[in-house]
Image: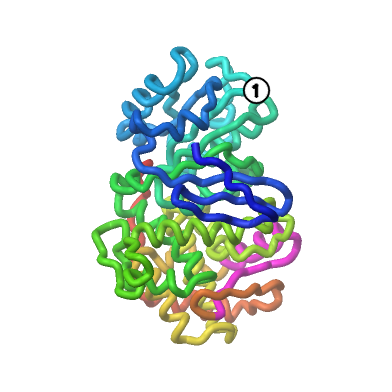
Amino acid sequence: MAEQTAWAGHGVLADDGGFALRAPEGTSYRVDLTDGVFAPGNPLLAEYCEGRRVIAFLGPSVDRLYGAQLRRYLAERLAPGSWSVVVIGGGEAQKTMDSVERICAEAKAAGLDRRGVMIAVGGGVTCDTVGFAAAVYCRGVRYIKVNTTLVGQVDVGVGVKTGVNALGTKNMLGSYHPAHASINDPAFLRTLPARQIRCGLGEIAKMAIIKDAQLFRALEECPEVFRQPCPPPSWLAAEGGRGVEDYVLRTSMALMMEELCPNLREHDLARLVDFGHTFGPVIETASDYRIAHGESVAVDMAISSELARVLGVIGAEDCERIVRLISRLGLPVHDPQTCTPELMQRALRASWERRGRRLHLVVPDGIGSAVFVDDLEDIPAAALEEALDALAVRPGSLPGPLAVAH
């Protein structure tokens, strides 16, 4: 197990094995990068279990791909009778309080005590749901995230939020419950369907657009990253010979953690990382999850960028670069069934209510930079309609329902 790096103050520190975070309010945790997390010779996961009672949860697809490896690893590394593995449902339809209760029931039946550990092996849905169960089981037990999707590795896996969908709203119920460990193994990405990779690239593009022009450039030059080999651009090769995948993965993880760190529990509701998450949740829910999370983020980013152009916040050329990049990553920029003026106005008002009667809409004002539009009155209905109309005429369409992968 990687040692927590000691340093004065707070912030995010990178090392060869991952990243350590210490927030101003005192929370600290690590996100580890490792190869072969379930290889018998890799001690990382077993050391985080620390000889405690363990129950691991994973979805059917992850069980099919990695279940046998996980069971062999636990059998070789943990004491006999101290662990069990449970397969749970996958997909947004399973991200409910009923699932949380079933997870807790499985933990109780397995004899998990207050010193026990839940392990979530999967993507964002699995980690969010198991994490919330761990937060409420016996008023809180440790849990470990083994993130198997790109969205999980760059987004869910680096933060402290858990939650489920309820009352017709995405992530309506949840908690801040930092994982005891969060482990990323890039090898998992090799078995992801292309659509799952594209969804992860949506979250990576989010951080590039609002925080890092160089990461944006890397995505522009290598839009097929994680899907096919891409030789590093000369400017990246000159920085130490890092591969494109390693650069993109580590940079997006670091950016997300650095942005989260000062405001880990969201006492300040104006958050740059909410870019793509104002219109997106309503689009996702209204589509009955036909539109995947990363796709809803992409459509939201396109709407927000075009809206910034209409409002005079960003120039037309930079706006076009952003929307073009989203499309080149294979992501949608518009959905005719959900991107209606009426529904998008409803999304703005829902965000305004959720964020303490302030809108805090994140819009880019350049490549690698963003600002807030704080008041509903600052977005005339005509401006929103103009932005939606600009996207409606662009080519591209959404695929069918997202197959449950990891």
Instruction: In this rendered view, identify the residue nearer to me: 399 or 242.
Output: 242
> From the image, which quarter does the C terminus lie in?
top left
Q: Magenta segment range? A: 344-365
| Residue 358 among those drawn in magenta | yes
Residue 58 shows up from this direction: yes
Residue 203 screen position, x and y as percent: 47, 59
In the image, what residue type sits under mark 1? Arg
Identify which residue is drawn at 50% across, 40% down.
2
Q: Which residue is mark 1?
A: 114
Vertical position of residue 66 compared to residue 278: above or below = above
Instruction: In this rendered view, identify the residue nearer to me: 109 or 354.
Output: 109
Residue 372 screen position, x and y as percent: 65, 73
Residue 167 screen position, x and y as percent: 63, 44
SS state under label 1: loop
The figure's colour scheme reads: rainbow
Identify which residue is drawn at 64% across, 50% down.
22
Numbered-mark total: 1
Residue 388 screen position, x and y as percent: 49, 74
| Residue 103 among those drawn in magenta | no
Identify which residue is drawn at 68% across, 78% down.
378
